[in-house]
Amino acid sequence: MKTCVICGKGSSMKGVRKLLRGHYNPTSTKRVYPNLQWVRLLNSNSRVKACAKCIKALAKATRQN
């Protein structure tokens, strides 16, 4: 389960552009995963996997209150 619980961000396929004698050749694709970290939610003691962008947004929201 490699998806963010908060925003639902998951893996995606990205194309790799290889340079061969001055010409780009989009030959291969690879799967890119989000930066998921374990984090405790404020309201409950349960741990969930959230992406780094959501963790930064949660930290910013708690600092402003």
Image: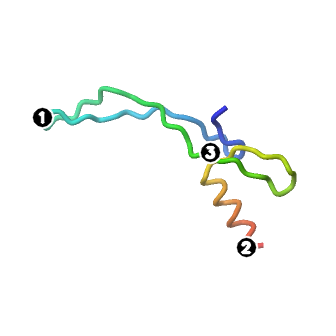
Q: In the orientation shown, which residue stands out farthest toward the left?
A: 21
Task: Judge depth for marks 1 and 3 and give the one in front.
Answer: 3
* Secondary element at tag 3: strand
User: Label 1 is placed on what type of residue?
Assistant: Arg
How far apart marks 1 and 3 lie (CA) works out to: 38 Å
Question: Of the residues shown, which amino acid type is indicated by label 3?
Answer: Leu
Which is more N-terminal, label 2 or label 3? 3
Instruction: Tell me if mark 2 has few (under 14), some (14-19) or many (20+) residues whose alpha carbon lies within 10 angstroms of its own.
Output: few
Q: Secondary structure at mark 1?
A: loop
The residue located at (59%, 37%) in the rendering is 10
**Label 1 Cα neighbours within 10 Å, binned few <14 / some 14-19 / many ≥20:** few
Residue at the limit of the structure toward the top, as seen here: 27
In the image, what residue type sits under mark 2? Answer: Gln
Task: Point out which mark residue 36 bears.
Answer: 3
Residue with the mark numbered 1: 21
**Residue that sits furthest to the bottom in the current view:** 64
Mark linked to residue 64: 2
Contact between marks 1 and 2 (CB within 8 A): the answer is: no
Q: Secondary structure at mark 2?
A: helix
Distance between the alpha carbons at the discs numbered 3 and 2: 24 Å
Spatial CA span between label 1 and label 2:
53 Å
Q: Considering only vertical position in the picture, is 8 above or below 30? A: below
Question: How far across and how far down the image is residue 33, in percent?
Answer: 53, 38
